[in-house]
Amino acid sequence: MLTHAAAGLALPDDVGMAPANYGVLVETRKPDGKRYTLLRLGPYTQAGHAARDADRLTSVLQGRAASVVPGFAVTARNAPFDVSDHERFIAPDDADAVALLAAAVEGVSA
């Protein structure tokens, strides 16, 4: 980027690499260690955006992680976006990650 800017050139549209994709997983864990994925968000094209949503979800869960889904600890973390599993992810564009978590928890409770 800097070499293009220093030369007064526009940034290239295609640098020969596919964009990296990131995701956020909200997982439930039983005391015996079994894990289940409650919510998958992605793809994010910037790691910072995925980290922001994971941090927001972690803040919401903090202190309530054991009571969100009774009998399970609930955590949010950054994860690679699995393109082959894309249909199981919810696109985070123009959506509130906290509202998506609330809907997912409601679906489990119902």
Image (spheres, rainbow, N blue to C red):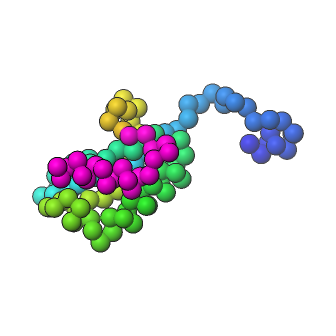
In the picture, residue 74 is in which quadrant?
bottom left
Point out residue 70 in the picture as x, y percentages from the top left corner.
16, 61
Residue 25 pos. (x, y %)? 35, 49
Instruction: Specify the farthest residue to the bottom.
Output: 63
Q: Is residue 102 left or right of residue 28?
A: right
The total number of labels drawn is: 0
The residue sitting at 23% across, 61% down in the picture is: 68
On screen, 40 above or below 18? below
Look at 43% across and 40% down and name the residue there: 91
Query: In the picture provided, is 47 more to the left or to the right than 70?
Result: right
Please check the rendered image and state whether residue 14 is part of the magenta-colored stretch, yes or no. Answer: no
Q: Nearer the viewer, residue 107 or 24?
A: 107
> Can residue 80 be seen in this snapshot?
no
Give the residues drawn in magenta, as a range: 90-110
Instruction: State the residue in front, 40 or 84.
Output: 40
The image shows residue 7 at horizontal and vertical percentages of 87, 39
Please state the horizontal and vertical placement of residue 78, each as a whole percent of the image: 41, 51
Quadrant of the image occupied by residue 23: top left
Q: Residue visible at 80% across and 39% down?
A: 4
Residue most toward the right?
8
* Image side of residue 63 versus residue 8, left or right: left
Task: Determine if residue 104 is in view.
Answer: yes
Above or below, comparing residue 98 to residue 13 in the picture: below
Kindly report the secondary structure that dominates the magenta region of the rendered protein: helix
Query: Which residue shows up at 26% across the image and 65% down it?
Result: 65
Image quadrant holding the N terminus, namely top right
